[in-house]
Image (cartoon, rainbow, N blue to C red):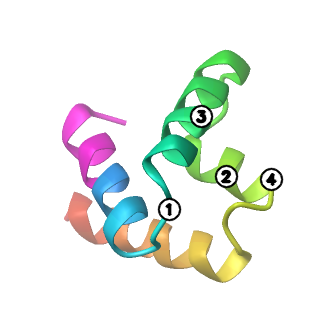
Amino acid sequence: MNNYLSREMIIYLFNVLGLDESTIELGIKLSVRNNTPLPILLWSYGILTIEELDKLYSFLFQKMD
């Protein structure tokens, strides 16, 4: 994922889904360490619901158009 989408994803996680900055930072560190996409990592740790994951991916795919 390029920097634009990564920045947009972080803004979405913070502003729309209401995740704490520290939660997002931890998620980023773990996703890098585990080589796992951030949305999947957040879902697998129970930070995002499957509905929130779906909304996030819908948002990201709209941004790609």
Residue 24 as seen in the image, left or right of residue 50: left
Residue 8 x, y percent position in the rendering = 25, 53
Between tags 1 and 2, which lies in front? Answer: 1
Instruction: Kindly identify the residue that appears in the image at 66 percent across and 33 percent down.
Output: 36
Tags 1 and 2 touching, CB below 8 Å: yes
Q: Residue furthest top?
A: 33
Q: Mark 1 points at which residue?
A: 19
SS class, disc 4: helix
Mark 3 crowdedness (10 Å alpha carbons): few <14, some 14-19, many ≥20:
few
Instruction: Kindly identify the residue that appears in the image at 25 percent across and 44 percent down.
Output: 7
Instruction: Kindly identify the residue that appears in the image at 23 percent across and 64 percent down.
Output: 63
Residue 51 x, y percent position in the rendering = 64, 82
Q: Mark 4 points at which residue?
A: 44
Residue 21 as seen in the image, left or right of residue 28: left
Q: What stretch is highlighted in magenta?
A: 1-8
Q: State whether the magenta stretch is mostly helix, strand or loop.
A: helix
